[in-house]
Amino acid sequence: MQLFRRFLVVQALMLWQGGFLFYAAVVVPTGTDVLGSFEQGRVTRQVTDVMNGIAFAAVMVLAWDQWANPEARRCRLGRWVLWAALATGLVALAVLHPVIEHLVDFGADGRVKDYRRFYFWHRVYLYVAAAQWVAGLAYVGLMLRAWGAKPQAA
């Protein structure tokens, strides 16, 4: 069961964190060059819902692994702190997404209703997503350390 659980953890993290990196580093710039900023935003509007769903599933798999893995107390605490950062970031993104959507008219004429507010909240969304990704990197480091540690005696 441990091997299966760890396999799921790795797959969930690769899909979530790797997918985020690929989308942010390759798809968005390419889409913006090909489609333009507003049309790329239409695509991203849909993709972020899916990415956040993947993130939710990954966060649940990470929690399962932490509960099931006996490890040193310090490492366990660090993983839970980072897990909380990942989960809190996910909640923040879920709250921010409709705020940003409300500021955009996705009708045929496609325009931003209040550009200053949109720009501010979109930047906040991007900073939260980037911080979440960095927390994910730190989480992977602690997770690998925990997996390599010998279980403590009860």
Image (cartoon, rainbow, N blue to C red):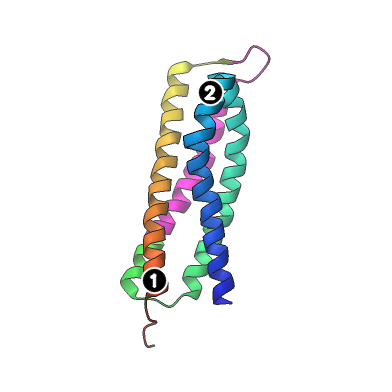
**Residue, far right:** 108
Residue in view at x 57 percent, y 38 percent: 48
Name the residue tied to disc 1. Answer: 146
Q: Is residue 4 above or below residue 46?
A: below
Residue 76 lies left or right of residue 40; in this view the side is left
Image disc number at residue 32: 2
Verify whether residue 87 appears in magenta. Answer: yes
Count residues near mark 1 (Cα–Cα under 10 Å), then give few for <14, some for 14-19, many for 20+.
many
Q: Can residue 104 be seen here? A: no
Q: Residue 91, how many percent across, how many down?
A: 50, 46
- Quadrant occupied by the C terminus: bottom left
Q: Residue 95, how many percent across, how many down?
A: 52, 39
Q: Mark 2 is on which residue type? A: Thr
Give the quadrant of residue 31: top right
Image disc number at residue 14: none
For numbered disc 1, what is the local secondary structure?
A: helix
